Image: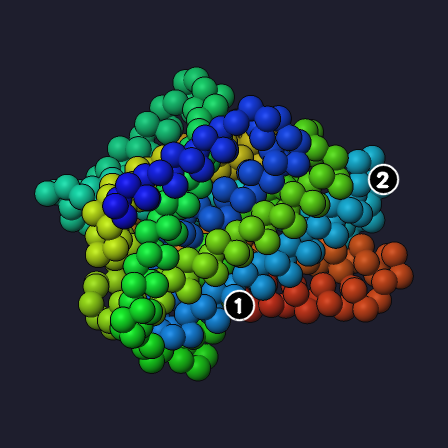
Amino acid sequence: MLNAAILASVVLTAILLWSPRLQKLPSWRAMITPLASIIGSGFLVLGPILDESYGKYAPLAMAALCIVAYFFGAAVRFNIATIGDAPTKRSAPEERLETLASAMLGFAYMISVAYYLNLFGAFGLSLTPVNDPTNAKLLTTAVFAIILYVGWTRGFRTLESMEYFSVTMKLSIIAGLLVGMAVYFFGKLETGQLIFLPPQTTGWASVTLAFGLIVTVQGFETSRYLSETYDAATRIRSMHWAQWISTAIYMTYILLLAYVFQQGELELTETAIVDMMKVVAPILPVLLVAAALAAQFSAAVADTSGSGGLIAELSGNRLSSRQAYALLVAIGLVLTWTANVFEIIAYASRAFAAYYAIQAAIAAVAAHRQSKGLRSAAFWLLALLGAAIVGFGQAVAA
């Protein structure tokens, strides 16, 4: 019955998301890109990490991540509003900071592609007899080779058409997962079997660990780069809604997960969520792996394409997009074979934090130029927080 209920919720959600009427709504189309980015890879790894590290305080850690992300989003939204739909000449400091931000975003994309494809490799083999770290890295390497071949010879336009399908699939499976987890949680609640674990990571270490997880709530900034399709007001509204909805999904997910597993019951790995969901319902691991493969591949394609375009633009086309793809793949392969997924997550978090720090600095300069002193000071504090994340973000101890 539980498997049937999970499947029904997946199918109903997919039908709703695939309805032509919903797809034609500009606000929905504008929101789906940042929403899918925010709850993509993070949904696969955050639950086990927070449960293992923060115990009964896992929901508080999740709330802190979402709040910090929302504040960084406020800086990006301010910059969207400042530029508007008919950009005027910015001050020289703002222009220089924007160029630096674009360069940092291109670099962050390079690391995030390694993050996505290493998760792809791990989840791709998680239910097979050949599931081990070396084989997962070999699968990741093969997918890097495919992406480089397609990008070098044909470009990504055909692959990018998968985006809405993969988003629909991912959100539908998340709906089914939450249904299964809710049934499991309330079953434990009724029998008085909820578990309130002490945190394993405390003090400053818990703060630096959270710093290293910022990439799991990253993705809202994509609204900033949809100006060719949507006006400023729509992009600002889409980011608001994407962050609110993703926060609601994440908080529900963590609340349902944090109090039903014993400490040490499952090994903390990048695919620990699969083992957790085996306990909840037999169908969930298969659905999760399917969602992971579709989501990670489409996200990797999107970020590879975005990084290539940014690098080509910033280099004045001295580097072509194809050469940028080759550089991205080279960096990704080095990370794949020298670091584990948790370390790559921390690297990506620090790279995106640097981008957010620069965006906050742009907002601070713009606010000062508009004689908004208090807001400028708040954005400078946000820039300092981003710099602190860059300097102190730590990886999970696997």
Q: Say whether residue 117 is visible.
A: no
Residue where numbered disc 1 is placed: 64
Q: Residues within 10 Å of mark 2 (few under 14, many from 20)?
A: few
Residue shown at the point (69%, 41%) measured from the top left: 235
Whether residue 366 is situated above or below residue 295 in the rendered picture: below
* Image quarter (top left, top right, bottom left or bottom right) of the C terminus: bottom left
Secondary element under disc 2, as helix, strand or loop, is: loop
Give the residue type that dot 2 points to. Thr
Residue shown at the point (78%, 64%) measured from the top left: 376
Q: Which of marks 1 and 2 is nearer the N terminus?
A: 1
Which x, y percent locates residue 197?
A: 32, 77
Whether residue 261 is situated above or below residue 285 in the rendered picture: below
Q: Say whether residue 214 is visible.
A: yes
Q: How crowded is mark 1: few (under 14 residues within 10 Å), some or many (20 or more)?
A: few
In terms of image quadrants, where is residue 32?
top right
Give the residue type that dot 1 points to. Ala
Given residues 76 and 351, the one toward you in this image is 76
Which x, y percent locates residue 111?
A: 43, 47
Given residues 328 and 8, the one toward you in this image is 8
Residue where numbered disc 2 is placed: 88
Whether residue 357 is situated above or below residue 16 in the rendered picture: below
In whole angstroms, how far apart are the C-alphas of marks 1 and 2? 36 Å
Given residues 22 and 238, the one toward you in this image is 22
Q: Nearer the viewer, mark 1 or mark 2?
A: 1
- Which numbered dot is residue 307? none
Which x, y percent locates residue 359?
A: 67, 53
Whether residue 356 is situated above or below residue 106 in the rendered picture: below
Residue shown at the point (43%, 17%) measured from the top left: 154
Q: In this view, does 33 lie to the left or right of 73?
A: left
In terms of image quadrants, where is residue 354?
bottom right
